[in-house]
Amino acid sequence: MLIVQIGFILWAAFLGCMYARKEYKNLTKEGKEQLKKELKNPTLVFHILPNIGYVLLFLGLVLNINALKFLAFMLAGIGWIIEGAEIWEANSKRGLIVVCIGSITFLITAFLTLRFLFDFSLL
């Protein structure tokens, strides 16, 4: 069963790479230059963390792998915190809400991970 799960994860990653390659080929020359400029920005990684988390959550639910689900929620929580911090500059109320949701998601997942891995409980 583990081989099937690993194969499914690799297949999903392969399909994502093929889709990205196809989209890149369809871009104009100016679009390709703009994309290269954006990819050099290190904060881009933080903006795609929630999306990576969503994909990992889907894979974790389909394959019933708890570790993948925990990782997905951690990535999504961190991504929401960073997104909320950037939204905060434009709209402080909305940014605060997103930061709080991301923080709560991250903390609950961290505590559940501690309980899952080390039989640790706060109560």
Image (tube, rainbow, N blue to C red):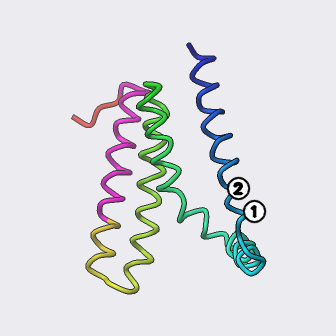
Going by the picture, which residue comes out furthest to the left? 123
Instruction: Let me know if residue 65 is in the magenta part.
Output: no
Distance from Cα at disc 1 to Cα at disc 2 = 5 Å
Q: Main secondary structure of the magenta part?
A: helix
Query: Quarter of the image containing the N terminus?
Result: top right
Residue found 47% across the figure and 56% down from its top: 50
Looking at the rendered structure, the secondary structure element under dot 1 is: helix
Reading the image, the residue beneath label 1 is 25
Q: How many marks?
A: 2
Amino acid type, callout 1 = Lys
**Residue at disc 2, secondary structure:** helix
State yes or no: residue 109 in magenta.
Answer: yes
Q: Residue 77: image x %, image y %? A: 41, 55
Q: Is residue 122 left or right of residue 15?
A: left
Mark sitting on residue 44: none
- Above or below residue 6? Residue 2 is above
Q: Residue furthest top?
A: 1
Magenta region, residue range: 100-119
Amino acid identity at mark 2:
Lys
Query: Residue 4 at x, y = what percent?
Result: 59, 18
Dividing the picture into quadrants, the one containing residue 48 is bottom right
Q: In the rendering, at what x and y percent does residue 69 appear?
A: 43, 36
Closer-to-camera residue (99/72): 72
Q: Which residue is mark 2?
A: 22
Label 1 close to label 2 by CB (< 8 Å)? yes
> How many other residues sit within 10 Å of disc 2, few (<14), some (14-19) or many (≥20)?
few
